[in-house]
Every structure is written in C-alpha cells, then in structure tokens.
Amino acid sequence: SLGIAANALANMYTRRQSEMERRRHQRFEDTLSALAADFIKRPVAEIRTGIEEIVDRFGRFAGSDRAAVLLIDEKDRTAYTYHEWIARGDPAPVRDFPIAAAPAFFEQLVTAGGPWLMYVEDFPPSDELAGAALEAIGIRTLLNCPIADGDHVYGYASIGYPKSRHRPIAGTEQVLAFAASIIANALSRERLEQQAAEHREALSRALRLGSLGQLATGIAHELLSLIHISE
C-alpha cells in the first residue's frame, strides 16, 4: 500500500509540474502576442526597442546564458549582432563574424525552415573558428531559428547555453520560432518604412529640381521677351 501511495503522489506531482509548465508557456505566449500587437502601433523609431524587449524575455524564459538576434550583411558577407541579452552581465559579447568562418552553419540556417539544436563540439572542421569563438565566451549548446521574409533568410535568433549537449526545456523551440516570426515582421516593417522614406526624399528632390527647371525656363522666356522688345 505504501508503494501504491508513493506512485500516486509521484503521478500527482508529475501532473502538477506539467500543468505549471503548460501555464508558464501559455503566459509567455500571451506576453509575446501582446508584444506583437504592440508592434503595430509602435513608431518605426521604437521597433528596435521592442525587439530588444522580446530578446530579453525569451532569453529569461529559456533559462539560457545568452540570447541574441544576428542579421546578415549580404554585401560584407558578415553576421552582425543586432541585440544580445546576457544573463550574468558577462562583458564578453558575441562578436560579428564572417559567413566564411561558419559555412556549414549558414547552409543549415538557409535550409532549416525552423528551430534546430546544435552542439559546438560537433561543429565540422569548416566551422572550427566559429566554434572556438563560441567556446571562448562559454557557449557549448545553441538553439537557433532563422529570421526570414518568405524564402529569404536575413538573420537568426539564437539561445546559448554553457552546458555541453544541453536539452532546452520543453516548448522552447516553439517559443523561439514564435519570437523569430514577430521579429521578422517587425524588421520587414522597418525596412519598408525606410524604403518609403527614401522614395519620398527622392520624389521631393525631383520636384525641387523640376521647380528650378521651370523657374529657369520662365527666366529665359522673360529675357527673350526683353530682347525682342529692345529690338
């Protein structure tokens, strides 16, 4: 009977833990949903602040050492840190690095289509420099998710853990994918707004030049009229 009672208590504890974890995930997803809705009302100048808030939140939720968003500069072929959250205030940030230093990683990034877990100790020789840089700042396990606009991948969200072959808590992959989709939409809106501003400025310049051209034409016409009168 003691064994039955112990099993019953163990099952009760397991169910309670599962329910608590489910509620925790739900609260966090509700928070992300609220942040996503908030992005619609945010001025473009505040989008970066909103993304930083999301990165900080999913870093804490995942119980990770670091969380970051890195974007790809296709012209320079470099991945640069857009924002990074560090749990213990470690002064050593994730450094920008050339894509050539991690070709296998970036190939996986383009083809993954969603979150994937990777261990630094398993990096192939082609990515040895990137692996050494991660180990130098204490990262041995990474959970990554592409940030994409359709089929075009232009960055990724990443969660880093100091423990080798770490297994993130259940549901972390889904939360990271949700966060990455919010960030992708926000960055797309930021780019569109910047392009619109550039187009407005170009149109304004063209109109100013057009006005100057009309003014010059008018002056030339007046001068010709004066010449004809003097003759």
Image (cartoon, rainbow, N blue to C red):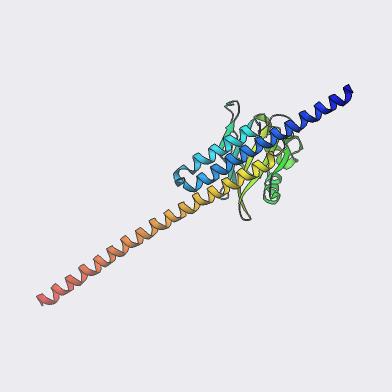
**Where is 214 relative to 53, above or below?**
below
Quadrant of the image containing the N terminus: top right
Q: On the picture, is 193 further left or further right than 180?
A: left
Q: Which of 88 and 225 is in front in this view?
A: 88
Is residue 172 shown above or below 148?
A: above
Q: Is residue 16 left or right of residue 81?
A: right
Q: How many numbered tags mark residues here?
A: 0
* Nearest the eye: 208 or 20: 20
**Above/below status of 200 relative to 10:** below
- At a point 60% along the width and 25% down the height, the residue shown is 88
Residue 14, quarter of picture? top right
Tell me residue 98's x, y (percent): 62, 43
Position of residue 201 relative to residue 16, above or below, is below
Q: In which quarter of the image is the C terminus?
A: bottom left
Q: Residue furthest front?
A: 1
Q: Does any portion of residue 33 appear in the rendered image?
A: yes
Q: Residue at x 69, y 44 (%)?
A: 115
Residue 63: which quarter of the image? top right
Q: Is residue 72 visible?
A: no
Q: Which residue lies furthest to the top in this view?
A: 2
Which residue ends up furthest to the left in the rendered image? 230
What percent of the width, then of the height, locates residue 84?
57, 35
Image x and y of residue 18, in percent = 73, 34
> Looking at the image, which is closer to me, 141 or 74?
141
